[in-house]
Amino acid sequence: MKKSVIREWVESIVVAFILAMVIRTFLVQAFKIPTGSMRPTLIEGDIILVNKLIYGAKVPFIDFTLPALGEPQRGDVVVFVYPEDPKKDFVKRLIAFEDESVEIRDGTVYINDKPLLEPVFNRIYYYNRGDYGQENKRIIVPKDSFFVLGDNSASSQDSRYWGFVPKKNILGKAMLIYWPPRRIRIIK
């Protein structure tokens, strides 16, 4: 006996939906950039793909994380649950890890008293703003946390203002701008 056309369509739609949810939950998710806090790397309206599997995807509704394929690296552009409002996701550049000291002097970030001189950092002037970014103030990143900064330091609400990102809040690594077409590129 043949299945009805409607039943075949319904089954196809259900399978496609389940597959899409598995991909979005565990592998890759799209995020739209709402502000200019990461300019020039990311601009308002960019839609990025975030690799959720690389740092260990979280299983919904239970406190379990899949094994990670790698650890976050300094300079990674990461998407995370905003510590002050869990309904919001933020995107920033990872600057420092637990037990590292962070200080901003004359526009340069110092980690454990050594300046970050890699091109991704030294093309940006970091302003001394917020409680955690004051001039001549060394901050120690607490256990299981990260210090993150926006690439547009003059216009970014980041760790300088609200502190640290708990490791459990990291959703994944921003990998690719895929929309609009003129901005398609790998995120560095």
Image: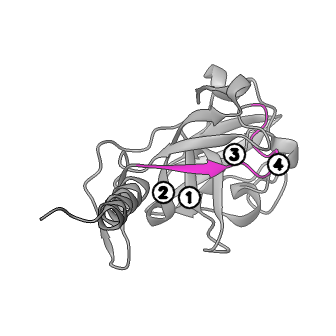
In front: label 4 or label 2: 2
Q: Is residue 37 left or right of residue 23?
A: right
Residue 40 location, quadrant: top right
Contact between labelled residues 4 and 3, with CB atoms less than 8 Å apart: no
Q: Is residue 95 above or below residue 138?
A: above
Mark 3 or mark 4: whose residue is earlier in sequence: 3
Q: What secondary structure is found at the residue carrying circle 4?
A: loop
Q: What secondary structure is found at the residue carrying circle 1?
A: strand
Q: Which residues are magenta?
A: 28-40
Quadrant including the C terminus: top right
Residue 32 shown in magenta: yes
Residue ID for mark 4 = 135
Residue 174 shown in magenta: no
Q: Amino acid at mark 3?
A: Glu
**Could you tell me which residue is drawn at 82 percent across and 48 percent down?**
135
Q: Is residue 180 left or right of residue 63?
A: right
Residue ID for mark 3 = 103
Mark 4 or mark 2: whose residue is earlier in sequence: 4
Mark 3 or mark 2: whose residue is earlier in sequence: 3
Q: What secondary structure is found at the residue carrying circle 2?
A: strand
**Could you tell me which residue is drawn at 71 percent across and 40 percent down?**
46
Mark 3 or mark 1: whose residue is earlier in sequence: 1
Q: Nearer the viewer, residue 61 or 99?
A: 61
Which residue is the extreme one toward the left?
1
Colour scheme of the rendered structure = one colour
**Could you tell me which residue is drawn at 60 percent across and 52 percent down?**
147
Contact between labelled residues 2 and 3, with CB atoms less than 8 Å apart: no
Residue ID for mark 2 = 171
